[in-house]
Image: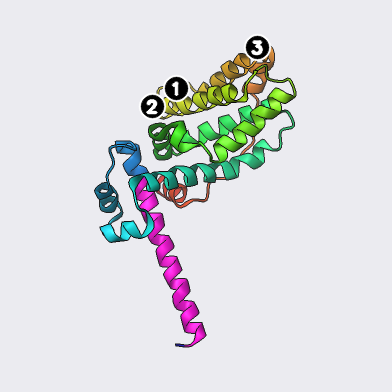
């Protein structure tokens, strides 16, 4: 077999493997969102994706491994489009608020992903990923500059992550007021020592637009909506 033919077959094989993996991840999001991370089984995923059990094991050894892939990759895809907007803010307090509002807003815009985030929780969905990294980065800067009056970065991170995760659950429930994210950030800023007057100004400041996530799950959601 000549080299061009081998290269072509290699590219086709790689594309086929990527397509199958994407189908597994896409199907897994809906399964996890509906059943939760602990009740879902491998049978649920292979049925939803329409693949054989052996195919599943070509990509993931356990449901936890699949969960980690779905949670980490989708969250990081969202952060990839949010963080450039966050970085435009010079005030670290504003960076925390802008990033949190955009992340929560993205969960409301893509409710299947939002429901998945609430079922997975912060421990599985954010620890060691970009959400944890970027939020901690901006909180540390806000504390170091004196913008936030919090003695321990871990306490600040846990309070902020709790606000984000529980906030997403409220948003996807359909029962949140129109300015829910602003109210949540207003309360968070005051908890971190920002005056009510300044907290209101920051929390309700106009948000810059960010790009839509490019991952297959988000692409499919946009196609179905449009």
Q: Nearer the viewer, residue 25 or 128?
A: 128
Residue 115 lies in the magenta-colored region: no
Q: Is residue 226 visible?
A: no
Q: Which residue is mark 2?
A: 173
Label 3 to label 2: alpha-carbon separation: 28 Å
N-term mark: 3 or 2: 2
Please say if the residues under marks 2 and 1 sit with CB atoms less than 8 Å apart: yes
Where residue 225 sits: x, y (%)? 42, 45
Q: Which residue is mark 3?
A: 196
Q: Which residues are magenta?
A: 2-28
Q: Nearer the viewer, residue 225 or 36?
A: 36
Q: Which image quadrant is residue 115 in?
A: top left
Q: Main secondary structure of the magenta part?
A: helix
The kind of secondary structure element at disc 3 is helix
Residue appearing at x 47%, y 32% in the figure? 122
Q: Which residue is mark 1?
A: 176
Q: How is the image coloured?
A: rainbow
Label 2 to label 1: alpha-carbon separation: 7 Å
């Amino acid at each position: 077999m000549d080299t061009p033919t081998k290269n072509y077959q290699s590219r086709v094989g790689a594309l086929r493997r990527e397509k199958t993996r994407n189908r597994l991840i896409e199907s897994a999001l809906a399964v996890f969102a509906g059943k939760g991370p602990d009740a879902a089984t491998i049978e649920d995923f292979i049925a939803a994706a329409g693949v054989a059990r052996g195919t599943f094991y070509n990509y993931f050894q356990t449901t936890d491994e699949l969960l980690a892939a779905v949670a980490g990759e989708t969250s990081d895809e969202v952060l990839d489009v949010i963080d450039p907007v966050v970085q435009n803010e010079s005030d670290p307090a504003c960076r925390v608020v802008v990033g949190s509002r955009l992340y929560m807003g993205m969960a409301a815009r893509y409710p299947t992903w939002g429901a998945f985030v609430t079922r997975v929780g912060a421990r599985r969905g954010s620890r060691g990923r970009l959400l944890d990294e970027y939020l901690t980065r901006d909180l540390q800067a806000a504390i170091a500059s004196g913008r936030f009056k919090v003695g321990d970065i871990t306490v600040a991170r846990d309070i902020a992550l709790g606000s984000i995760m529980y906030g997403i659950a409220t948003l996807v429930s359909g029962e949140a007021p129109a300015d829910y994210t602003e109210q949540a950030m207003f309360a968070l800023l005051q908890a971190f020592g920002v005056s009510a007057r300044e907290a209101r100004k920051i929390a309700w400041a106009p948000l810059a637009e960010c790009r839509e996530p490019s991952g297959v799950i988000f692409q499919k959601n946009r196609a179905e909506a449009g």
